[in-house]
Amino acid sequence: MKAIVFSVEAMLSLTIAVSLLGFAALHNAQPTYAPLYEYMVAQDLLEIGLKSGENSAAIAEWAAGSDSADAFLERKYAKVLAGLGNYCLELEAKGKRIDANCGGRGKQSVSATRLFFDGKNFFELKATVYFSG
Amino acid sequence: MKGIFSTDVSIAFFLAMLTLATCLSAFWLSASNYSSSSKAALDEKTAVEAADFVLKNCFPEGAAKCSDSLAYSHVLDERAQTASFTLHPNRSVSVKVVGLEAARGNGFCVRRPALLGGEEVFVEACAEELR
């Protein structure tokens, strides 16, 4: 009886040890550079918006309420994102928002912001990139 | 009494062997996991760093447009379109400027959006396994 009790106890300890070791073995502790890269991409998307005359004019018009600029930016960013991978971009400014390439939005996201000058006023331009982990 | 003792010892021995086998398997699994993921992480790091370097440094070391010692990050020099940047002597990473619809290169590749002559392009860095 005593032996069986000890064996059950030992088996319980072993089960817990196996679970812990198995978890440790399967858990990938190696850091990945993917989040850094996604963050760089979010910054890049803002940069190409600000540093191109055509794009920055469209951003200024879109923020002012133009529908044609909205469609132009969506198309433009969707084309860039198609070449990058499975990313979805959400661009926000002055309470307005456009989504590009957002068919299947990933659960993880990174955001970046820039101060944008439209010729009269400064406003904040925010890009959020969604991706699957 | 003797019978109970020998059963206890046998079970203890069996459990000890099982624990040892589990530890060895766990170690082997951890080691192979670490080896493959660290190799992938190294390729990833090399490609990310190379693309960033080329994007932010003046042509010909990088691809950025420069004037009066000022680099315009994300605005590429026209000459960078046909250039190829090899940053490591063993050619483990290569960087080039590609169009939006270009196919991906070999190895682990990262792409950074940039502007060339007002048009969107990618600075693509591909890292291949180090030899």
Image (cartoon, grey):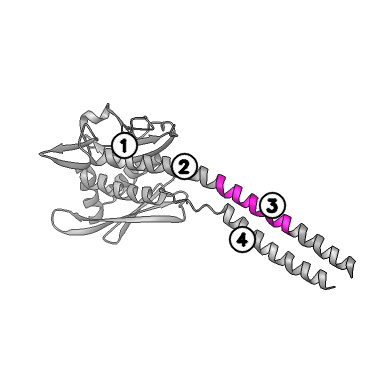
Looking at the rendering, the stretch of residues picked out in magenta corresponds to B16-32
Q: Is residue A25 magenta?
A: no
Label 4 to label 3: alpha-carbon separation: 14 Å
Which residue lies under the disc numbered 1?
B123
Earlier along the polypeptide chain: callout 2 or callout 1?
2
Which residue lies under the disc numbered 3?
B21
Chain hosting mark 4: A
Identified by mark 4, the residue type is Leu
Residue at 52%, 47% in the rendered image? B34
Label 1: which secondary element: strand
Which residue lies under the disc numbered 2?
B40
Q: Are marks 1 and 3 on the same chain?
A: yes
Chain hosting mark 2: B
Q: Nearer the viewer, mark 4 or mark 3?
A: 3
Q: Is residue B19 magenta?
A: yes
Residue at 42%, 40% in the rendered image? B43
Q: Are marks 4 and 3 on the same chain?
A: no
Q: Are marks 4 and 3 in contact (CB under 8 Å)?
A: no
